[in-house]
Each structure stands twice: as structure tokens, then as C-alpha cells.
Amino acid sequence: MSSGAEHWTTWEDLGASAECIECPLKDDKFVNLPLYQEIPPDRPGGSSVPVVYIFGLNVPDRFANKTLESIGLRKRFNLNAVAVEMVQGKRKRLNLAICAQNEAMPPPGLGVTLWVGVQGGIGSLKQICEFLGELPQTLRARWVPLRSFHIGRIPQWVGCDLVQNRIRAESGVNVLGICLAGQADRVQMFPEPGHVLRATDVLLVLRPDEERLEAIAQR
């Protein structure tokens, strides 16, 4: 398992959007953003970049010092953890280990923001309001680029699901999406833990997790 220090990063290191997008509440819904899309290349002949839109939630004090599993982030609220942002002096840093290794959330008073993906988008307020304990008037959003990794490069994982492969528990990798059979138009974001991997599947992950997968493939 990777050490906690390796899970610290910044928005810049991830190549994320520099500024937050404010999604206002209107007619009992937020201005919706796609969960996943491909951004056109920034130069002729370049490749499009797959990105995921994630949303920043202030963590209620009642969840401080609890793990995301004990909070029931996915089972209870249908929210999928991507990163935990903390303010340290004038710098914002991201902790990916809390999401990947089920570590405890920080105590109150550290300016903690939990960045999540919402299966199906944010048209429905229910799960967000239940998590926050209130109705927010806006939501902060960012897009984050995803890296592709062909699962066939790790043959021992083929034919087993995400839990059986212990991809999170042992490797510290947070699988944010899967291109089914490697097809860009068949993307399943935030796959279920019981998803059985096929040799043709392509994992969609953040840059640090791509590096972890590369290291596993080369063992």
C-alpha cells in the first residue's frame, strides 16, 4: 500500500480547472453539468481529454473524525469521494488517501471540503441536502482530467471484481470510471464494487493513480 504522503497533491498537479464553477440553485434544481465529457484538444492534431466534474461540499461537524465508509457516503447518500481539500496556511492541498484508503476525516476547523462525484448528475437535491443537513444556494464545481489505463496489462485482475482485486484497499487506487470494452462511448462512471473487470476494459483514474497502476503492471 502506498504511504499517506504519496496521496497529497494539488489541483495544479492534477491538471484540474484553475477556478471553481458556481452552480446556482434555480427552480429547486442546480444548473446541471455533465458527469463526464471529453474536452476538445487544445492544439491541432491533439487528443481530446476525458474529464469528470466534481462538486465541493463543506463537511458537517457530525462527520468529523469518521471514515467515509462509516458515514455511508456511497450507500446512504449516493455520493462518490474523489478528494479531500484542506487549507494549510495560504495553500490548498488535496488528500487522496482519505478517499482511497478509507481514512478518517479531519477534525473540524481545518477548512475541509469533500469533493465528490454524483452518480447521474446533480439535478436531484436529495442526497446532497441529506449529507449537508441543509439546502445550499450554490454548489462549487471543478473539472478534473482523467487518465486511461488498460486493465489487460494486469492479467491477474481480469475476471475478478473491484473488491476481489482489492484495488482500493491494497493499491490505494480510486477507480472513477471504466470505459467498457475500451469504448469511449460506453463509459460507466463510479462503477459498482461488484463490477467484474474484462481484459478490454479501460480504467479512468487521476494522474497519481495512473502512476500506481503503472508500477503494479511493471512488477
Image (cartoon, grey):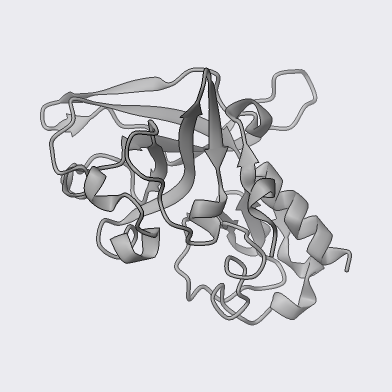
Side (left or right) of 154 relative to 202: right
Q: Is residue 142 above or below residue 130?
A: above
Residue 150 location, x and y as percent?
A: 74, 60
Residue 178 location, x and y as percent?
A: 58, 58
Q: Is residue 135 above or below residue 91?
A: below
Q: Residue at x 77, y 69 (%)?
A: 152
Q: Residue at x 61, y 49 (%)?
A: 184
Q: Quadrant of the N terminus?
A: bottom right
Asked if residue 186 shows in the view, the reply is: no
Residue 141 location, x and y as percent?
A: 40, 29
The residue lying toward the viewer, choosing from 7 and 38, is: 7
Q: Quadrant of the C terminus?
A: bottom right
Q: Kindly indicate the quadrant of the structure image that contains residue 10.
A: top right
Asked if residue 125 shows in the view, the reply is: yes
**Residue reaching furthest right?**
218
Q: Residue at x 52, y 37 (%)?
A: 37
Side (left or right) of 64 relative to 198: left
Residue 161 location, x and y as percent?
A: 56, 77
Q: Residue at x 62, y 51 (%)?
A: 204
The residue lying toward the viewer, choosing from 116 and 149, is: 116
Counting every numbered tag in the picture gives 0
